[in-house]
Image (cartoon, grey):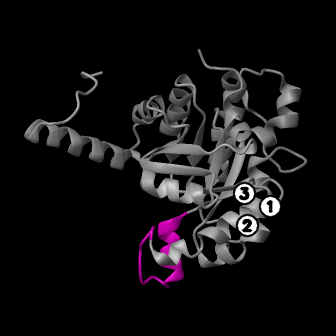
Amino acid sequence: MIQTGLVSSLSEKLAAGENVLLAWCCLGMPHLGEAMLREGYDAALFDMQHGSFDFAGAVRGVELAALAGKPSLVRIPVGDFATAQRLLDNGCAGIVAPMINSVADAQAFAANVKFPPMGERSWGPSRTLQIEGKPDLMEFLKTGNKRQLAIAMIETRAALEAIDDILAVPGVDGVLLGPADLSIALTNGGLVNAEGDVVNAELERIAGAAKRAGKIASSFCGSGQRARMLLDKGFQLVSAGLDISVVRMGARAELKAAREGGGKAGAGGY
């Protein structure tokens, strides 16, 4: 049974100051995201920008996450705000929008994903109302903007310079650092290093801007170790690896145990 208030549980946890670990899913296999959630991740993110998820696959991921009792986000392709509305109507707890580089970009994003008077989102959240377990239309109209999050990516020099103004846009609930792209941008195309000094030098700036605005600081993190580092620096919503890295690490561990012995007993298949 899907728990009542599932969609809003992510915004509520973050508002209460809790940290959230994301299962970042790129491979286009919704069941893998569900499996990661059942192992203890707090929420999932299904990636339509650089991952293999199409609309139907992302919606299936949202549903399977709900079946596991967890909320989920979707990262949309650049500027695809029409798809963002459809995803929010189908039970997504929030949208991550890439390449939000200015106040104008942030305003367009918020306008498309928030209901009036904050935005211009068209009404039609019937599937979300089912998943949320709150079929009262008026209640959802009044609270939907708070329940479902709009998170703008910071991944260019322009976005970094405008971060305070982007966070000040009504309807933008937080920012998400895209560290690889930011490293490319800040070195003028000279380097890609998501965990290098050029990115690390900006971490406190990004987390501090979100804190001052009373909004969410989040980031892609390629490992649990990196996630811990960013949580300690004030980020609240972070991935701890992604599906392909989790599969590869698990494969290495199982092959090592089979070839060399000495490993702990596993789960016995399922």
| Residue 265 found in image quarter | top left
Q: Residues within 10 Å of mark 1 (few under 14, many from 20)?
A: some
Measured as percent of width and height from the top left, residue 89 is found at 69, 35
For marks 3 and 2, the one nearer the N-term is 3
Q: CA distance from mark 3 to mark 1?
A: 18 Å
Residue designated by label 3: 109
Residue 86 in view of the camera: no
State the residue lying farthest toward the top.
1
**Membership of 157 in magenta stretch:** no
**77 vs 200, nearest the viewer:** 200
Which residue is more in the foreground, 209 or 119?
Answer: 209
Disc 3 element:
helix
Q: Is residue 99 visible?
A: yes
139 left or right, relative to 29? right
* 194 in magenta: yes
List the residue tagged with mark 2: 209
Q: Position of residue 11 (x, y in %)?
A: 72, 40
Viewer-side label of 3, 1: 1
Q: Quadrant of residue 13?
A: top right
Please give left or right for residue 105 compared with residue 238 in the image. Answer: right
Location of residue 229 with respect to 125 vertically, above or below: below
Quadrant in which the N terminus appears: top right
**Could you tell me if the residues under marks 1 and 2 are in contact, i.e. CB atoms within 8 Å?**
yes
Q: Amino acid at mark 1?
A: Ala
Q: Amino acid at mark 3?
A: Phe
Q: Amino acid at mark 2?
A: Ala
Q: Mark 2 falls on what kind of element?
A: helix
- Which residue is identified by label 1? 213
- The residue that appears at 84% across and 36% down in the rendered structure is 143
Q: Report the magenta residues as a range.
A: 178-195
Residue under the point 71% across and 70% down: 163
Percent position of residue 16, x then y: 74, 41
